[in-house]
Image (cartoon, grey):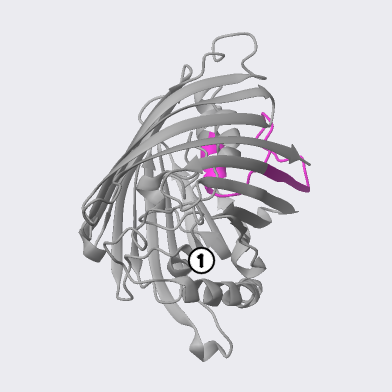
């Protein structure tokens, strides 16, 4: 009953936002104006995900336990006995990003404000209530994009029950763990990797329920998703998702995930993925990440049955403070990344990024990056097919 109420209330709350975004959707085209060249709106910055991820690299047991807990979205602080000592905890994440992008009519891009607040209420006996709200606004093409319904989203709102390490369940607005970013994996760029953000929704969440757990070196998640509406007879089943991860050695995770369903009334339309139709579709993904001895290496490959779209991305970075006495307080991570999108209509692109992340204090991150993107196909004669971009960002997370 509680889960059903959460689904109805939250989907009703987001329905207006989805309708607003649907009006902005355009059909896929091979011209510059409607191809996926402007991915600034929907990809959310992942500085906050990264801060969580990098603090969990001390040893194998802590790595596995925390990775498993993070994928459960519980973010529980666990002591050496495995017992949570807080009834309520949360965080407030804020950031400011500025960039110049050659693919815009006006190159200046400002991401301000951007706030994410989340909270976890532990009810005892394995019960937890989790909520996460996000607001993000852009200044682009010499104007502010101020539409509260489009800028605000409720990423999570669910109730979970841990029965054992091998079996737990949750219901409400939950994540769809397809792709490395949606599964909580690392990402070193300021905005979500374009090899993922141009083919699947980012911060992907839907109303539904899932089961999850860990068995030895394996963990899993299976979820079903529904679009709820009043009266309930108008509700619609969206689809289902699965994820399976394997941890063969210290610091290495390899995973596969999939989703089958319909994009008719789900977050596909909020994300404005122009190439997606309204028929059923299937995603298949492989991803991995390695975080050990200062190295951060991760990548993903995605296939979508709609237009047989494919993408791939890989990045590598190294924390020069990992082996110093300042490891717990400072990070300095230069990195490079490749993103590719293939067979999306007539449009292909290859993007190359180099950047650096610096964390002088706990929860404070400063980033800078430069990227060049080469497009092939979908352009009229004389149109520019190579674009350059530069971005800087600062973020801080307040934990309470």
Q: Nearer the viewer, residue 369 or 271?
A: 369
Give the residue displayed 35% in from the left and 70% down from the top.
Answer: 261
Q: Is residue 50 above or below residue 249?
A: below
Estimate the x, y position of residue 80 in percent, counting from the top left: 66, 28
Q: Quadrant of residue 78?
A: top right
Q: Nearer the viewer, residue 175 or 20?
A: 20
Say whether residue 174 is left or right of residue 240: right
Q: Nearer the viewer, residue 61 or 70?
A: 70
Give the residue displayed 35% in from the left and 30% down from the top.
Answer: 248
The N terminus is located in which quarter?
bottom right
Which region shows up in magenta? 65-94
Q: Nearer the viewer, residue 209 or 303?
A: 303
* SS category of the residue bearing label 1: strand
Estimate the x, y position of residue 60 in percent, counting from the top left: 49, 25
Q: Is residue 330 above or below residue 398?
A: above
Q: Is residue 78 magenta?
A: yes
Estimate the x, y position of residue 138 in percent, counting from the top left: 60, 54
Instruction: Write down the residue under mark 1.
Output: 206
């Amino acid at each position: 009953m509680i889960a059903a109420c959460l689904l109805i209330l939250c989907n009703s709350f987001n329905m207006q936002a989805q309708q607003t975004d649907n009006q902005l959707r355009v059909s896929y085209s091979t011209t510059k104006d409607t191809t996926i060249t402007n991915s600034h709106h929907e990809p959310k910055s992942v500085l906050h995900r990264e801060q969580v991820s990098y603090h969990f690299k001390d040893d194998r047991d802590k790595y596995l336990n925390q990775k498993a807990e993070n994928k459960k979205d519980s973010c529980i602080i666990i002591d050496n006995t495995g017992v949570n000592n807080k009834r309520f905890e949360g965080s407030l994440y804020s950031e400011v990003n500025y960039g110049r992008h050659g693919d815009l009519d006006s190159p200046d891009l400002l991401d301000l404000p951007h706030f994410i607040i989340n909270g976890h209420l532990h009810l005892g006996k394995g019960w937890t209530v989790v909520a996460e709200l996000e607001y993000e606004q852009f200044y682009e093409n010499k104007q502010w994009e101020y539409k509260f319904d489009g800028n605000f989203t409720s990423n999570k709102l669910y109730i979970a029950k841990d029965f054992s390490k091998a079996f737990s369940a949750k219901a409400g607005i939950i994540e769809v763990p397809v792709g490395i970013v949606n599964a909580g994996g690392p990402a070193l760029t300021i905005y979500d990797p374009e090899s993922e953000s141009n083919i699947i929704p980012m911060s992907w969440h839907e109303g539904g329920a899932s089961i999850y757990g860990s068995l030895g070196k394996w963990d899993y998640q299976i979820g079903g998703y529904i679009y709820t509406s009043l009266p309930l007879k108008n509700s619609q089943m969206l689809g289902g998702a699965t994820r399976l991860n394997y941890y063969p050695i210290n610091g290495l995770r390899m995973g596969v995930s999939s989703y089958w369903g319909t994009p008719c009334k789900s977050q596909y339309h909020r994300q404005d993925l122009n190439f997606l139709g309204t028929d059923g579709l299937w995603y298949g993904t492989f991803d991995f990440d390695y975080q050990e001895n200062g190295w951060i290496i991760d990548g993903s490959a995605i296939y979508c049955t709609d237009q047989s779209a494919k993408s791939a991305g890989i990045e590598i970075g190294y924390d020069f403070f990992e082996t110093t006495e300042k490891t717990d307080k400072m990070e300095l991570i230069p990195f490079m990344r490749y993103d590719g999108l293939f067979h999306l209509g007539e449009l292909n692109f290859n993007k190359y990024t180099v950047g650096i992340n610096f964390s002088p204090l706990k929860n404070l991150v400063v980033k800078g990056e430069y990227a060049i993107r080469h497009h092939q196909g979908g352009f009229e004669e004389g149109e520019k097919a190579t674009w350059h971009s530069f971005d800087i960002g600062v973020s801080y997370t307040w934990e309470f």
